[in-house]
Image (tube, helix red, strand yellow):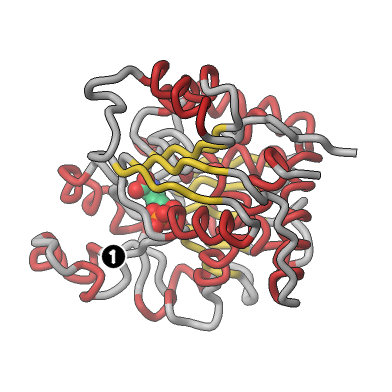
Amino acid sequence: AFNLKGRNFLKLLDFTPKEIEYLIELAADLKKLKYAGIKPRNLEGKNVALIFEKPSTRTRCAFVVAAVDEGAHPEYLGKDDIQLGKKESVKDTARVLGRMFDGIEFRGFSHETVEELGAYAGVPVWNGLTDKFHPTQILADFLTIKEHKGYLKGIKFAYVGDGRNNMANSLMIGAAKMGMDFRIVAPESLFPEEELVEESKKIAAETGAKLTFTSSVDEGVAGADVVYTDVWVSMGEEDQFEERINLLKAYQVNAEMMSKADSSALFMHCLPAFHDRETLVGEDVYQKYGMDALEVTDEVFEGPQSVVFDEAENRMHTIKAIMVATLGNQ
Ligand code: CP
Ligand code: NVA
């Protein structure tokens, strides 16, 4: 019933709720096959290019393992390896890579770059994170919620922290599409940009989703099924660390905050996370702010409600589903 062959995967706005549901279910199926030791090799003979302007652990490894599991060859192209943006335009790079590869992943700064690659490559282009959106992460997060809670529609989802970054943006769109009760819990200056809020509200009006924007932790986290946070400074924003700590220290996810949520609430984080001294090594700010510099305490991160490593694993299964759905041999 679903044919996503040849489609790009650039942002969730481009997909219907049914298509998103389908990708999550396909990922669950592919996960079962992998656990059973069955490798269907849906991408046999394909070559995929993986462009990374920014560093990555999960996304890079998920694309590589998923490609190899399905019989494809992944080629990693780091920021200093190709001419992109230095000697060669995005448009030309897209057309060259599209002549050689069957699919292209891009992680980088500007969202326009991935849209331009998608417009000119002639093969499926997948967004591995831009400053605006991180759509593959959302599929992994929603699969994780389905595994633990059994459903998505009506899930009370509190996103706490930087409400203007790629994670907040993509979660808001995804939650609106899937009919969730979604709350952005952040200082007002870090609420998502108005245009995206308006778009999300339109989607919510059709799906029955509820969207709340509040600076009150009590209101936003009350009864939540999921408490989600992300780093306070995203890649490329490192000079804002001090300002963000001051804005966000009241939004740290700690045991006290978790006690306001439902007693069986999940703690989620896309990772990487600042949760203890070790993760802050090299950051002078820790000397000054100590525990206040962490977006989540070690107690919560390591505690029984945390499903962060399920999310990390699910990056691989969901990215595999995206590649198989848009590029598979069947
Ligand atoms: N969550 C995520 O995208 O992790 P990486 O930056 O390590 O890919
Ligand atoms: N908001 C974070 C997400 C990392 C996966 C960043 O862009 O750095």
For label 1, the crowd category at 10 Å Cα-Cα, with few meaning under 14, some 14 to 19 and many 20 or more, is many
Amino acid at dot 1: Leu
Q: Nearer the viewer, residue 134 or 50?
A: 50
Return the x and y of residue 101 as percentages of the image width and height.
Answer: 53, 35
- Which residue is found at the position 54% from the left and 18% from the top? 119
Return the x and y of residue 198 as percentages of the image width and height.
Answer: 58, 23
Cβ of mark 1 under 8 A from ligand 2: no
Mark 1 lies on a secondary structure that is loop
Q: Is residue 230 visible?
A: no
Q: Is residue 18 above or below residue 140?
A: above
Q: Is residue 163 above or below residue 42?
A: above
Q: How many marks?
A: 1
Ligand 1, seen in the image, is in the quarter at: bottom left
Query: In the visual, does 283 lie left or right of 266?
Result: left
Q: Nearer the viewer, residue 93 or 301?
A: 93
Q: Nearer the viewer, residue 94 or 197?
A: 94
Q: Residue furthest right?
A: 1
* Res 243 quadrant in image: top left
* Res 207 quadrant in image: top right
Query: Which residue, given by chain and number where applicable, does mark 1 sit on?
Result: 294
* Res 255 quadrant in image: bottom left
Return the x and y of residue 91 as percentages of the image width and height.
Answer: 42, 16
Query: In the visual, does 286 lie left or right of 270?
Result: left
- Which residue is found at the position 44% from the left and 23% from the top? 96
Query: In the visual, does 52 lie left or right of 218?
Result: left
Return the x and y of residue 321 as percentages of the image width and height.
Answer: 68, 51
Which quarter of the image is occupied by the N terminus? top right
- Which residue is found at the position 58% from the left and 49% from the top? 138
Q: Is residue 206 above or below residue 154?
A: above
Q: Is residue 226 above or below residue 320?
A: below
- Which residue is found at the position 19% from the left and 43% from the top? 240
Which quarter of the image is occupied by the C terminus? top right
